[in-house]
Amino acid sequence: MKHFISLCASFLIAVPALAGPDEDLAAFRDFYIKSFPLVELADHKDGAYALDEAKREQWLEMEDFPPYEIAVDDGAELYSEAFPNGKSYADCLGEQAPAVKHLYPRFNDNEGRVETLEWVLNTCRLANGLPALDYLGEQMAALTAYIAMASRGKKVNVVVPDDERALAAYNAGKQFYYSRRGQLNFACSSCHMQITGRMLRAERLSAAIGHTTHWPVYRGKWERVGALHERFRECNEQVRAVPFEPQGEEYRNLEYFLTYMNNGMELNGPATRK
Amino acid sequence: MTDITMQIRISIIAGFSLALMAGWIGVSLPVSASPESLEEGREIVADRKRGNCYTCHQMAGAELAGDVAPPLVQMKMRYPDAAVLRAQIADPRMRNPNTVMPPYGAHGILTEREIDRVVDYLLSL
């Protein structure tokens, strides 16, 4: 497949290229407040359902018997099983465990890289003599669903520390977000900013504010609970761009930028989507 | 035969051979589009793997169309010059560098021939 990548010109208009994370966040929030003057910023945590009354009603009906509940229960069980050496996930996740979702992704200054919740769960397993879990597998989905449920109501609080490497990772994610890719020539921002709120065929395009609050997600299309990076892959594939590895550096940095843009939003995962 | 009818005849013949030549060098004129080629254009426009134009544009015959872009109506009147329409489809960035419309020709999403069929079809709407 040919690689088509270029930086979206609207990026320069929407968000000044030289601005830091704080200015970016202010501009990002402002953009959606202006785009949807009748929608409370906080309501975008429900994605497209904050913008479409008819779809919202169907969705609320689905939520009567949330299809992600089994995954949450399985996750609780996995989480509570002690490792062979007697330690557990809680030992790796710090004081607030298991309600820690709002703190991720975070920059690990020892390793000089961005770490997502999934990444830290696997690092924890490896450090305790267990094999890593498949990032797109059922067990990872269950564990993260349980942790998301435990973290409900917390506000996203991602930090970009005063460290060149952290800023570089953030900027790489930002650059990714505004770069056009694929044969069809779309950036993330083309769909979720430039034409956000519009109908792409039968799909209402959600705002990017709210994009990271509710993962993992049970999707009807997948018939199971899946991860944010799976959605990234799908959004890349639908514009005929080459998708990246789940939890590879590109998507971890993308998640870092995007979640920073969601700072202050309330966590409401796991969730259900079409 | 009067001079005047002679002149008309000549210009008809000239016009006809111009149209033929145009056909040979691949510039499609709406008058030359057969029902089959119009149908092919419609299929390309509707096909999610090729034109997929309904994703963004409302137009005659579209099902489940999106509302990202202006409805494609009265095309013949709005595009007296087919080349302008063709350019919009081949690379819409020429007119608007910020557009979300895919560059169908420049990125090889449609072949030259497919773009011709789409232009013919749009001009028949």
Image: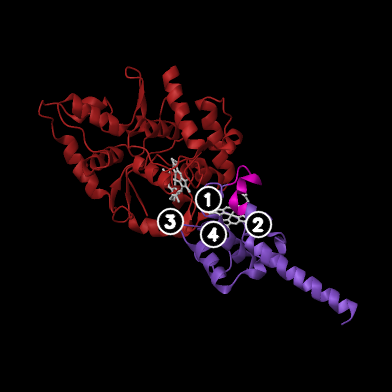
C-alpha span from label 4 to label 1: 31 Å
Residue B47 appears in the rendering: yes
Q: Chain of mark 1?
A: A
In space, the residues marked 4 and 3 are separated at their CA atoms by 39 Å
In the image: residue A121, left or right of residue A188? left
Q: Earlier in the sequence, mark 1 or mark 3?
A: 3
Q: Residue at x 76, y 69 (%)?
A: B14
Dot label at residue A56: 3
Q: Are marks 1 and 3 in contact (CB under 8 Å)?
A: no
Q: Secondary structure at mark 1?
A: loop
Discs 4 and 3 share one subunit? no
> Who's purple, chain-wise?
B
Mark 4 sits on what residue? B114
For label 4, the crowd category at 10 Å Cα-Cα, with few meaning under 14, some 14 to 19 and many 20 or more, is many
Other-residue count near label 1 (Cα within 10 Å), few / some / many at <14 / 14–19 / ≥20: many
Callout 4 touching callout 3 (CB < 8 Å): no
Which chain: red?
A: A
Provide the residue span drawn in magenta: B88-99
Q: Quadrant of the N terminus of chain A?
A: top left
- Residue pictured at 33% horizontal, 31% vertical: A116
Farthest-out residue, bottom: B1
| Mark 2 burial class by Cα count in 10 Å: few <14, some 14-19, many 20+ | many
Residue assigned mark 1:
A197
